[in-house]
Amino acid sequence: MLATRHTFVLVHGAWHGGWCWRRVADILVARGHKVFTPTLTGLADRSHLMSASINLDTHIADIVNLFEWEEVRDAQLVGHSYGGWPISGAIEKLESRVSSIVYLDAFLPEDSQRGLDFQTPENRAVIDAMMARGEFQRPKPKASSFNIVAPQDLAWVDAKMTTQPLGVALQPIRMTGARDRVKKKAYIRTTVSNNTFFDGFAAKLKTRAGWRVYEETCGHDMMVDQPERLADILVECA
């Protein structure tokens, strides 16, 4: 018999969609938990809604509205990679409904920062050129850039990814400390993927009270590479 039934809201990263959580969601549901895997506006099964008007507030609203219409309470909110941005904004409006929060190889923004502030010089040059041309969709990268371990998963992820709305990286986030007030907080760093920003977040949180930090040997898309292990961690953090 399941000791405690948890609710999980799993938010994907850039170029991905709710589809990337399928393996983890199936495991958690099989264990008796409740799982939501929303796709953010403009991506994957909602790619038909792509537009120049999509910004960070749009993706924050996606998460907040899910909680509202599905009457989600006492949930664990998880953000992967770019997903760290909208979950950080959403927690400002959902503080009373979130019991734990997990950042999976994710950005950990502070007030007034933008996604544009966390780019390599090469990526920043590409984005600047896109803005100069009036473009609003960031082309999808190759799945191999996420250090996905299983060769058969590369083709699957490549086929599923869609363009990322550029506007989400241009809007400063507004935060007032709600994230810090969540009692249970965790950061998961995957050690096979190279990202100095994520390394910095993990190192900082190791010394910050109230945070649990995990280091896992797998690629950036842990939900693809190690779904069983990720499910175990999420339940442990809930």
Image: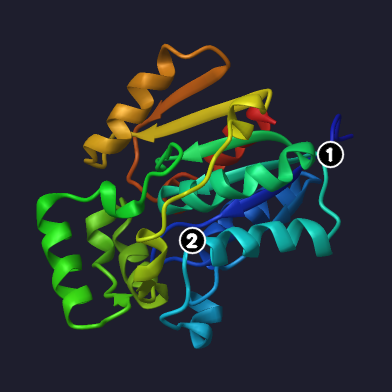
Residue type highlighted by circle 1: Arg
Kindly identify the residue that appears in the image at 53 percent across and 84 percent down. Answer: 49
How busy is the neighbourhood of tag 2: few (under 14 within 10 Å), some, or many (20 plus)?
many
- Quick check: can you spot residue 103? yes
Residue type highlighted by circle 2: Leu
Residue at mark 2? 56
Q: Estimate the spatial distance between the alpha carbons at disc 2 and disc 1, rounded to whole Å.
A: 31 Å
Image coords of residue 36 (percent x, y): 70, 58
* Quadrant of the image occupied by residue 68: bottom right
Is 158 rendered above or below residue 209? below
Kindly identify the residue that appears in the image at 70 percent across and 31 percent down. Answer: 238
Image coords of residue 110 (percent x, y): 43, 36
**N-terminal-most mark, 2 or 1:** 1
How busy is the neighbourhood of tag 1: few (under 14 within 10 Å), some, or many (20 plus)?
some
Tag shown at residue 143:
none
Quadrant the N terminus occupies: top right
Q: Secondary structure at mark 2?
A: helix
Kindly identify the residue that appears in the image at 38 percent across and 68 percent down. Answer: 167
Q: Secondary structure at mark 1?
A: loop
Residue at mark 1? 5
